[in-house]
């Protein structure tokens, strides 16, 4: 067994420095109830379907690859990633971090459907060329195939009607008929706006999700009323083309954070309905809440009897164990765990799980001058209220000018960076803020602040990043150790942010290695140990 992994096991067995930390976050309380947020991590733009007694969900991960994570659950509380729609996006140098970037773009707001034995998913990159992707599979666990490229539809929701016709709702109340096989739009088919925004509403209504219930059509959307708060609205009609009437179905802040809105509703097959709606929580991103959906006078009213997101409620389905979306990894498997995603398309010849068995080798593949354009940065979500990630790295393969380490990665990033200078290696805690061109997302400049630097005395180093996402905090703290026991804090606490103008994403753990002078260097990552604390 590997030295670093043995130390990690001993660390866990002894309770380490965090005896109250669990290995995986979940809202599951273990007593038949769960607490909101059901997933305190970045899971925006959810769409959820039920097939038999299985639930499937898709979310947005934008510039991360593989993209469009598909998750499975038996109880709507505990979710695991089972596949992605695609392994990479091609067609533009920006997808490979060349010439420009696709930060805050890429895959957005995917729609998930099941129809006649086939699963369908549609998304359109929020980037030129504006053209959508339709993927299909007979089994979400076995991967997806690209079926067609159809026009761009913003925040779209696919819908198959009882008569076999296919549609897409998108934008602010727009409806388009598609060919039944989703190979394109239906020539001469329905193309219209099903409602006009009323005087109460401001700007876009978006985040379309559509269901049909007891013969009526329900279009759920997010709304920002003039002078009001973010909320969930529903448009209802007897015919798919309307006329539609509107009702506010959720307008509630929760747990001291902003108002909850955007998502969908789903039934359990036994007459019970639930809302799966996200909430903005600053540095950690957009977290998932689960709540009752009560049909009142033919409207799907969200929240408890008072219209509030419940802090705790019974699990919709009993008997399933807690699971988490963020995991530890000793890199012994032949494939990367599905929980990992690369920042933009990876250079697949520059990483390996085979060259040194039991380690992830990250090789330098391109000479760059900053983390934001460095290929092969590997990420996982961070979670609230508190979490910690420890990475064990062997630095002996680094070359002069190489930079490797661990980051709280976002458009404002807190970074633990090991820099190789000749035969010496230095560890620096620093912050970097990227400025991006608004049109093509090219990196314009980096505002860098080096807080503290120390010279390292060993080629095996443990780097630790602690995140505190409790109300009004969003603080990242950084530590290093030579033995995974005796830790030294380095630098200062770092304030994590959420900025929709740049990354539009919650902060991620990020493992990286890049060259600033010459290629050929590498680092070997022995383990990533993840812990979570639920206050």
Image (cartoon, helix red, strand yellow):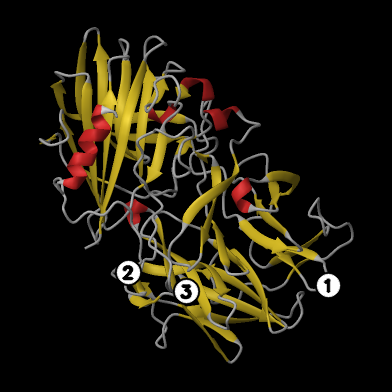
Disc 3 packing (10 Å; few <14; some 14–19; many ≥20): some
Question: Can you name the residue that lies furthest to the right here?
Answer: 188
Where 392 falls versus 149 (above or below)? above
Secondary structure, mark 3, is loop
* Left or right of residue 117, residue 70 in this image: left
Numbered circle sitting on residue 306: none
Contact (CB < 8 A) between labels 2 and 1? Answer: no
Towards the viewer: 315 or 224: 315
Instruction: Please identify the quadrant where the N terminus is shown.
Output: top left
Say which residue label 2 marks.
Answer: 30
Residue drawn at x 83%, y 60% is 180
Which of the labelled discs sits on residue 163, or is there none?
Answer: 1
Instruction: Describe the element under mark 2 as helix, strand or loop.
Output: loop
Q: Nearer the viewer, residue 530 or 243?
A: 530
Which residue bears the numbered disc 3? 317
Q: Nearer the viewer, mark 1 or mark 3?
A: 3
Can you give x and y, in whole percent of width and height, for residue 336 in the image?
Answer: 46, 36
Q: Earlier in the sequence, mark 2 or mark 1?
A: 2
Comparing 466 with 476, the one in front is 466
- In this view, 194 is above or below 133: below
For the C terminus, the image quarter is bottom left
Residue at x-position 37% and y-position 10%: 517
Find the distance from the CA under tag 1 to the CA under tag 3: 32 Å
The answer to whether marks 2 and 3 mark residues whose Cβ atoms lie closer than 8 Å is no
Residue at 30 percent across and 56 percent down: it is 384
- Does any portion of residue 149 appear in the rendered image? yes
In this view, 34 is above or below 350: below
């Amino acid at each position: 067994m590997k030295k670093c992994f043995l130390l990690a096991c001993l660390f866990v067995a002894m309770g380490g420095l965090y005896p109250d930390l669990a290995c995986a976050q979940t809202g599951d309380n273990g007593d038949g109830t769960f607490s909101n947020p059901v997933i305190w991590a970045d899971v925006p733009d959810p769409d959820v379907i039920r097939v038999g007694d299985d639930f499937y969900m898709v979310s947005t991960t934008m510039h991360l690859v593989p993209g469009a994570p598909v998750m499975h659950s038996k109880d709507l509380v505990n979710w695991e990633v089972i596949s992605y729609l695609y392994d990479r996006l091609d067609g533009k140098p920006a997808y490979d971090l060349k010439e420009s970037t696709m930060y805050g773009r890429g895959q957005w707001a995917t729609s998930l459907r099941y129809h006649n034995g086939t699963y369908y998913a549609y998304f359109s990159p929020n980037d030129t060329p504006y053209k959508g992707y339709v993927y299909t599979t007979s089994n979400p666990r076995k991967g997806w195939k690209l079926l067609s490229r159809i026009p761009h539809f913003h925040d779209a929701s696919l819908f198959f009607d009882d008569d076999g016709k296919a549609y897409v709702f998108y934008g602010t109340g727009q409806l388009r008929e598609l060919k039944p096989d989703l190979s394109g739009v239906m020539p001469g088919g329905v193309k219209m706006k099903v409602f006009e925004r009323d005087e109460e509403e401001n700007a876009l209504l978006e985040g379309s999700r559509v269901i049909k219930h007891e013969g009526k059509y329900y279009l759920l959307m997010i709304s920002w009323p003039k002078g009001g708060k973010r909320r969930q609205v529903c448009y209802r009609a007897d015919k798919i083309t309307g006329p539609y009437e509107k009702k506010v179905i959720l307008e509630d802040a929760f747990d001291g954070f902003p108002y909850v809105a955007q998502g969908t509703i789903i039934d359990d097959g036994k007459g019970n309905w639930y809302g799966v709606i996200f909430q903005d929580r600053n540095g950690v991103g957009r977290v998932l809440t689960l709540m009752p959906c009560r049909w009142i006078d033919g409207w799907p009213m969200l929240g408890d009897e008072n219209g509030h997101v419940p802090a705790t409620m019974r699990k919709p389905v009993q008997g399933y164990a807690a699971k988490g979306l963020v995991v530890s990894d000793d890199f012994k498997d032949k494939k990367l765990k599905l929980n990992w995603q690369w920042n933009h398309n990876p250079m697949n010849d520059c990483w390996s799980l085979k060259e040194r068995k039991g380690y992830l080798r990250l090789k330098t593949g391109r000479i760059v001058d900053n983390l934001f354009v460095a290929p092969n940065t590997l990420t996982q979500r961070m979670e609230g209220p508190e979490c910690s990630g420890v990475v064990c790295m062997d630095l002996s393969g680094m070359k002069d000018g190489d930079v490797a380490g661990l980051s709280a990665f976002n458009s404002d990033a807190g970074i633990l960076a090991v820099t190789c200078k000749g035969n010496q290696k230095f560890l620096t805690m620093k912050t970097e803020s990227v400025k991006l061109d608004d049109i093509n997302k090219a990196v314009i400049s980096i505002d860098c602040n080096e807080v503290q630097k120390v010279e390292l005395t060993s080629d095996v180093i443990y780097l630790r990043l602690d995140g505190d996402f409790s109300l009004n905090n969003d603080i990242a703290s950084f530590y290093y150790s030579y033995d995974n026991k005796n830790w030294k804090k380095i630098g200062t606490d770092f304030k994590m942010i959420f900025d929709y103008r740049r990354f539009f994403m919650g902060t991620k753990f990020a493992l990286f290695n890049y060259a600033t002078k010459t290629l050929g260097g590498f680092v070997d990552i022995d383990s990533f140990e993840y812990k979570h604390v639920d206050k």
